Amino acid sequence: MSALPVLLSGSGVGFTLGLIGGGGSILATPLLLYVVGMAQPHLAIGTGALAVAANAFLTLAGHARASNVRWRCAAVFAAVGVLGAFAGSTLGQAVDGQRLLFLFALLMVVVGVHMLRGRKSQGGAAEPAGCGPVPSGKVVTVAFAVGVLSGFFGIGGGFLIVPGLVFATGMPLIDAVGTSLLAVGAFGLATALNYALSGTVDWVVAGQFIAGGLVGGFLGMRLANRLAGYKGALNTVFATVIFVVAGYMLYRNAGAFAATP
């Protein structure tokens, strides 16, 4: 397996994480399958989850330096969400790989629609609610639900965590983007560990993917700092990419539910 496609794919994934705080695993799985050439969907999901987790933690450092991380909320979402991610990834491994990819593509369409609706920058420095020493039931419920979905589909969950944080706490969007990365990394690591226990992680490819992500993440962070006020345009462009990838995955797995188990 050539290293160049892996490095380029990792760079692209790192770039999206650095730029908008999500989209890592939504791109990682199809890139590993259709660009890198992995033959097994579950192997691609497990490997991608590990690589995205590592890149999310590295990108988190940049957002922390920009004061975009609300650590208490990040800790609650990460801790509670990890439990959901373990449960979700266990369920995901019991589902036929082709069917899992078909459902994954449908989720991508939903995410794309959400992005087209626009995530406008929110002003002010509102203090997030529900993340005190005893987190609110709303925060705990949303964190667990996002974790389950993240683990089931093998995604880091950035596009689920960011709106989840805004919905559950009312924090400004830019803070939700930075704060989400701790949970993205934790969810991805929980999913990757679960897949690793069943031998469905390619460690060499994961290392190459992470190396590429270092470069992409740095470039994404630089661009995000310059274009922070134009997230609507970035969402539109990235939503278009999501629709294209989702459409291709739906086409490739169109017979998933018609086939005999």
Image (tube, rainbow, N blue to C red):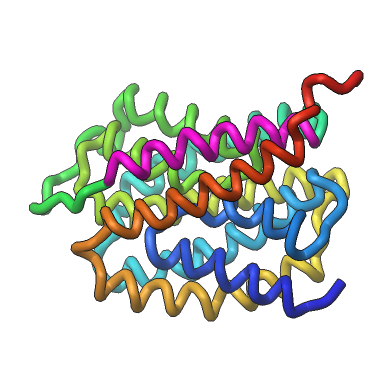
Magenta segment boundaries in residue numbering: 98-118
Q: Is residue 188 left or right of residue 233?
A: right
In this orientation, which residue lies closer to the viewer: 93 or 31? 31
Residue lying at the far right of the rendered structure: 260
As displayed, is residue 179 above or below residue 166? below
Residue lying at the far left of the rendered structure: 124
Q: Is residue 112 magenta?
A: yes
* Residue 107: quadrant of the picture: top right
State the image coordinates of residue 189 (x, y, percent, origin top left).
63, 52
Q: Is residue 181 magenta?
A: no
The residue depicted at 74 percent of the width and 31 percent of the height is 254
Q: Is residue 154 visible?
A: yes
Magenta part mainly helix, strand or loop?
helix
* Residue 105: quadrant of the picture: top right
Q: Is residue 148 left or right of residue 228?
A: right
Quadrant of the snapshot with the C terminus: top right
Q: Is residue 83 visible?
A: no
The residue depicted at 45 percent of the width and 53 percent of the height is 22
In this orientation, which residue lies closer to the viewer: 109 or 205? 109
As displayed, is residue 66 above or below residue 33? below
The residue depicted at 80 percent of the width and 55 percent of the height is 201
The residue depicted at 57 percent of the width and 38 percent of the height is 150
In this orientation, which residue lies closer to the viewer: 134 or 47? 47
Q: Is residue 79 left or right of residue 210?
A: left
State the image coordinates of residue 94 (x, y, percent, origin top left).
80, 27
State the image coordinates of residue 208 (x, y, percent, origin top left).
72, 74
As displayed, is residue 57 above or below residue 176? below
* Residue 198: quadrant of the picture: top right
